[in-house]
Amino acid sequence: MKISQLGTSDMWLTPIGFGAWAVGGGNWAMSWGPQDDNASIAAIHKAIDLGVNWIDTAAIYGLGHSEEIVGKAVKQSRVKPFIFTKSGMVWNEKREIKRTLLEIRREVEDSLRRLQVEHIDLYQIHWPVEDTDIEEGWSTMADLKREGKVRHIGVSNFSTAQMERCLEIAPITSLQPPYSMLNRAVEAEILPYCLDHRIGVINYAPMHSGLLTGAMSKERFANLPPDDFRRNAKNYQEPLFSRNLAIADFLKQIGARHDVSAGVVAIAWTLANPAVTAAIVGGRSPEQVEGVWPAAKFHLAEDELREVEAFLAAHPAP
């Protein structure tokens, strides 16, 4: 299995990392529905046992609960993976969420406590807030690095213009953008920019929130929990939904040639982009983790990449 350097940092990452969004559980605005904590911890342990050497979470996932679960699971593990988390989304006692870059110093202390660690390996701004707050927020991030509370700092969901503003203050270790066959917006400008500036890329949602796993169906969608955010997600609505399921079926055909799932093919497709360092892959159970683990070693051949491109071109979004 190949490992890759994240930007100019001293961290070398496995091709896939454990994404801890869903393990935050239910009862918040971007929930994946109810989640059993023991299953979450078992999934994290399975990922570590298989060789995954980094975990990505965020304070907002489950309103702190994901970080607590990650902290507990890693505490129990003999092998200590890199831990990445994010700031910039806060909530109040009514569970109302807002984006702000003005509370990062408080946020990092809360994250350190929940994760039960002395420092965070990669601390990221989750979402940009416009105007002067970007400069103030990134300056705080740089201060936290100098103080040793975090080892490296990165951004998530930033444009090239926003990254330019950050670079005036301090280097960016990495960008975390959404990137999948169904969301290619970063290909034209953002990924080339990161490649040119030696900014690592850890893309999230390579299977587009389960749509490209090969396990999603209209019946399964109809039975999602009421608080699963995907019920209202654009790509789960018609006519996009039928088109996206057809793409997943096509990926199943490619995967069948190699005895891997459609999801593994979808992840491998994102990893084929030279700007992508590694992909964030969620898992809610040990079985799910095992199912996607082959993506750490699987590569699509050049003719298969062309085959995928031809299929996507023939099936554009309505």
Image (tube, helix red, strand yellow):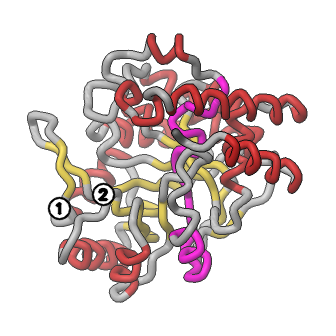
**Three-letter code, disc 1:** Glu
Q: Position of residue 279 (x, y in %)?
A: 61, 52
Side (left or right) of 102 relative to 49:
left
Q: Name the residue at 68% across, 45% down.
A: 312
Q: Nearer the viewer, residue 106 or 224?
A: 224
Query: How many numbered tags mark residues here?
Result: 2
Regarding mark 1 in the picture, which secondary structure is present there? loop
Residue 218 vertical placement versus 284 (above, below): above
Left or right of 85 on screen, residue 291: right
Q: Which residues are magenta?
A: 190-214
- Seen as rendered, the residue at the extreme left is 93
- Residue 107 location, quadrant: bottom left
Q: Are marks 2 and 1 in contact (CB under 8 Å)?
A: yes
Q: Position of residue 201 (x, y in %)?
A: 56, 64
Specify the quadrant of the image occupied by residue 82: bottom right
Report the disc number at residue 103: 1
**Residue 167, above or below 100:** below
Q: Please determine whether, in this image, residue 41 is positioned above or below residue 173.
A: above
Q: Position of residue 264 (x, y in %)?
A: 72, 38
Residue at point 31% right, 51% down?
111
Instruction: Tell whether position 176 is magenta.
Output: no
